[in-house]
């Protein structure tokens, strides 16, 4: 598949993830009468990945996440020379999704985007969890997410079930981590809204690159332990 088409698929998928997932938090969860709550936000993130994995996964592999791309590369399932291309496309896609969401969210009198679904720790954490809690949960949950992706897309697994497993995994991760960091496990997802909010969201952004990328990379290394029978 030509690189241009694969990069467009990653751009589109990541934009959809940010627009759908962050949009559910910024637009819907902000109104209690709509009743989606944080469980609805978790489901929205899972659905964005599930739908785009089936829509454009056959084109690009359906990463939509720099940590996933790094993890797959470390596991030998993705060319290392193409990692940077994918990461740039994902970050740009996330920014595009956040830009669309920003235009919508500010399209009424007296609009206030608030935290704009950004990630954070300490005072920026929904539950006021500290730096260590944020590092640990983002690392561990990304490790688990990339492990699930590697397993669900393994040649021994049924290919039709991959999108469902990955989408449900992301939903579960959000159910656990929203109170701690507002859930990242995806540097592109974290970068996009932070650019529109600035301040603490940008100063804390380093954690939401370091922890997920390390978690994904170590998951890629560790998954080899499950493949030594080949």
Image (cartoon, rainbow, N blue to C red):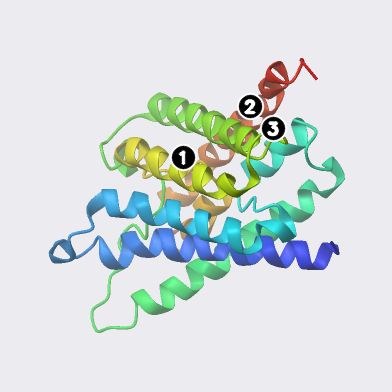
- Coordinates of residue 126 in the picture (x, y in percent): 28, 43
Instruction: Look at 49% across and 67% down and name the residue there.
Output: 98
The image shows residue 153, relative to residue 143, as above or below, that is below
Query: Quarter holding the N terminus?
Result: bottom right
Quick one: label 3 or label 2, which is nearer the N terminus?
3
| Disc 3/disc 2 C-alpha distance (Å) | 18 Å
Left or right, residue 19 beside residue 27: right
Numbered label attached to residue 181: none
Instruction: Look at 28% across and 83% down and name the residue there.
Output: 108
Q: Do the residues labelled 1 and 3 touch (CB within 8 Å)?
A: no
The image shows residue 110, relative to residue 1, as above or below, that is below
- Mark 1: give few (<14), some (14-19) or many (20+) Cα within 10 Å: many
Numbered label attached to residue 156: 3
| Disc 1/disc 2 C-alpha distance (Å) | 15 Å
- Coordinates of residue 11 in the picture (x, y in percent): 65, 64
Query: Quarter holding the C terminus?
Result: top right
Name the residue beneath numbered marker 2: 219
Q: Nearer the viewer, mark 1 or mark 3?
A: 3
Instruction: Look at 59% across and 56% down and name the residue there.
Output: 53
Left or right, residue 110 beside residue 117: left
Quick one: label 1 or label 3, which is nearer the N terminus?
3
Name the residue beneath numbered marker 1: 169
- Mark 3: give few (<14), some (14-19) or many (20+) Cα within 10 Å: few
Quarter of the rendering containing residue 228: top right
């Amino acid at each position: 598949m030509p690189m241009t088409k694969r990069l467009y698929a990653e751009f589109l998928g990541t934009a959809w993830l940010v627009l759908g997932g962050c949009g559910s938090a910024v637009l819907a969860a902000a109104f209690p009468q709509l009743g989606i709550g944080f469980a609805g936000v978790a489901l929205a993130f899972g659905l964005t990945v599930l739908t785009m994995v089936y829509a454009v996964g056959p084109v690009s592999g359906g990463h939509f996440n720099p940590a996933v791309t790094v993890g797959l590369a470390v596991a030998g399932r993705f060319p290392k020379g193409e990692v940077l291309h994918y990461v740039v496309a994902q970050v740009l896609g996330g920014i595009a999704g956040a830009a669309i969401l920003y235009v919508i969210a500010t399209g009424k009198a007296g609009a206030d985007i608030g935290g704009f679904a950004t990630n954070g720790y300490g005072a920026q954490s929904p539950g006021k969890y500290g730096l260590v809690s944020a590092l640990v949960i983002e690392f561990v949950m990304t490790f688990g997410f990339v492990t699930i992706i590697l397993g669900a897309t393994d040649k021994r697994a049924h290919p039709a079930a991959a999108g469902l497993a990955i989408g449900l995994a992301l939903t579960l991760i959000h159910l656990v981590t929203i109170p701690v960091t507002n859930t990242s496990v995806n540097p592109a997802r974290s970068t996009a809204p932070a650019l529109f909010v600035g301040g603490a969201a940008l100063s804390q952004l380093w954690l939401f690159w370091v922890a997920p990328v390390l978690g994904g990379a170590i998951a890629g290394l560790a998954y080899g332990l499950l493949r030594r029978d080949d």
